Image (spheres, rainbow, N blue to C red):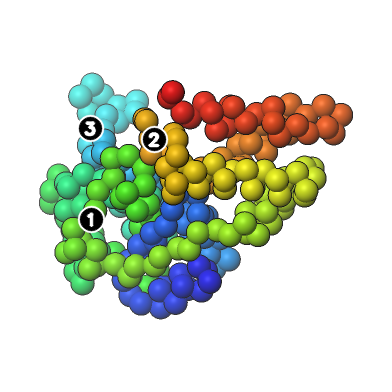
Amino acid sequence: MNAQRLLRATKLNKPILLQGSPGVGKTSLVAALAKASGHTLIQINLSEQTDITDLFGADLPVEGGKGGEFAWRDGPLLAALKEGHWVVLDELNLASQSILEGLSACFDHRGEIFVPELGMTFQVQHEKTKIFGCQNPFRQGGGRKGLPRSFLSRFTQVFVDPLTVIDMEFIASALFPAIDKTIVKKMVVFNNQIDHKVTVEKKWGQKGGPWEFSLRDLFRWCQLMLVEQFSGYYDPGQHVFLVHGKRMRT
């Protein structure tokens, strides 16, 4: 269903914003679709420290050149837009206001980027390029904020449903076939129980949070078991503290 929603959204000539809980597979879904359709995907992770020059480019020293010699070098976003690649902007609601303002012109009907340092305007190749934004709900994870409505209106929004228990069991068993399926099933139940007690029931684990235990934590758990397995014997309990307890501060 998530893939179907994303495919329907690609029919519209607008950037797509995927919103869903951490570890639900937003970026992986776009990567799978890009691979299946033969597009090159460029992933850019945003944060509060990301500067506009990190995306579009800057004048940098010429390698092997004369002292004080600088030349313009395209940033990953500008290079991808020139080539007509697909772009994923991850953690969009962690970006600063200056980043959002710099991206606005490239998302709307103008479809262009103006680089003041060059005095040049670059057109986005709409027939090839597709821009995806990914974000977690601003109530989940630290430092996130709600994006302005004027900015959100430039996107087709796709809400990604959480993975079910069956989904998580299938994915984990497919990626880690060496671990018995009955063990994987118990690990999924345990991981989901902890997540429910912390995020929904709020019985404990509230200091220093927020904490969400998702498919990513299940992957870490499986990887640790594979590294330290002994003669095919897997002990899930051996790494519970490392995966779940270590994230707590008290």
Instruction: Assign a secondary structure to mark 1.
Output: loop
Residue depicted at 32% across the width and 49% down the height: 139
Instruction: Assign a secondary structure to mark 3.
Output: strand
Q: Nearer the viewer, residue 250 or 99?
A: 250
Query: Disc 2 residue type?
Result: Gln
- In the image, residue 192 sits, relative to residue 14, either above or below, namely above
Q: Quadrant of the C terminus?
A: top left
Percent from the top left, x then y, of residue 142? 32, 39
Residue depicted at 20% across the width and 24% down the height: 68
- In the image, residue 62 sits, relative to residue 131, either above or below, namely above
Residue depicted at 39% across the width and 67% down the height: 158
Judge from the rendering whether residue 223 lies leftward or rightward of residue 66; answer left or right: right
Q: Earlier in the sequence, mark 2 or mark 1?
A: 1
Percent from the top left, x then y, of residue 44? 38, 47
Q: Earlier in the sequence, mark 3 or mark 2?
A: 3
Q: How many marks?
A: 3
- In 3D space, how far apart are the residues under numbered discs 2 and 1 (Cα atoms)? 25 Å
Judge from the rendering whether residue 187 lies leftward or rightward of residue 118; answer left or right: right
Instruction: Assign a secondary structure to mark 2.
Output: loop
Judge from the rendering whether residue 193 lies leftward or rightward of residue 20; answer left or right: right
Q: Which residue is mark 3?
A: 70
Q: Nearer the viewer, residue 104 or 54?
A: 104
Q: Nearer the viewer, residue 134 or 188?
A: 188
Q: Does residue 183 appear in this view? A: yes
Q: Earlier in the sequence, mark 3 or mark 1?
A: 3
Image quadrant in which you'd find residue 176: top right
Q: Which residue is mark 1?
A: 147
Residue 206 got which mark? 2
- In 3D space, how far apart are the residues under numbered discs 3 and 2 (Cα atoms)? 50 Å
Query: Disc 1 residue type?
Result: Leu
